[in-house]
Image (spheres, helix red, strand yellow):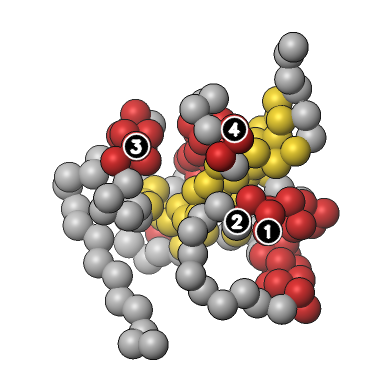
Amino acid sequence: MQHERTIRRLIATDLDALLTIYTHLHTQDAPATATRLNQVWQQIMADPAQIYVGAFVDNQLASACHATLIPNLTRGARPYALIENVVTHPDFRRQGLSTQTLQALIDICWAQDCYKIMLLSGAQRGAAHNLYAALGFDGSSKRGYILKPNT
């Protein structure tokens, strides 16, 4: 049986589907209220620097990722992009959806004249690292550092 697949930018009505797929990110953060989530989503939808892309299988969100375009005064005043929250629902893994979703996001970032695209990945996530390398990301030329509050 052939399944209908669509890769597209997320729209305002995709919030519930996105929040559902985010349950597979394995974060330990306290959940935000529905009111707060809706406020933030409205901000995101109003900000052209926020780009969310999803892969849909039979109209169900199966994979998603996000990039923020960051204005920059160097490199000819070209922006750069930071990718975050790459996730695929476990029922749809190993079907190429993450690759297709990330490639669509990368294409949008290049079309916005970004001079580079960055992402961070958990040090232990070997399969994800292989995916990123296959898409052309260089995991050895720079080192990422993260600072989090002491809570």
Q: Tell whether 104 sits left or right of 134.
A: right
* Residue at image location 32% in from the left, 61% down from the top: 74
* Quadrant in which the N terminus is drawn: top right
Q: Residue at x 17, y 47 (%)?
A: 141
Q: Are marks 2 and 1 in contact (CB under 8 Å)?
A: yes
Q: Are discs 1 and 4 less than 8 Å apart at CB?
A: no
Question: Residue 28: x, y in percent?
Answer: 48, 70
- First of labels 3, 1 by sequence position: 1
- Return the disc, 4 or 2, that comes first in the chain's sequence: 2
- Amino acid at dot 4: Phe
Report the label total: 4
Residue under the point 64% across and 51% down: 21
Three-letter code for the amino acid on which mark 1 is drawn: Leu
Residue 48 image point, x, y percent: 65, 59
Q: Nearer the viewer, residue 130 or 91?
A: 91
Question: Which of the labelled discs sits on residue 19, or is there none?
Answer: 1
Going by the image, does 56 lie left or right of 73?
right
The residue under the point 31% across, 34% down is: 130
The mark found on residue 92 in the picture is 4
- Name the residue carrying label 2: 22
> Where 82 sits versus 113, above or below?
below
CA neighbours of label 2 inside 10 A, class few (<14), some (14 to 19), many (20+): some
Image height of 64 relative to 98, above or below: below
Q: Secondary structure at mark 1?
A: helix
Query: Is residue 100 in sight in this rendering?
Result: no
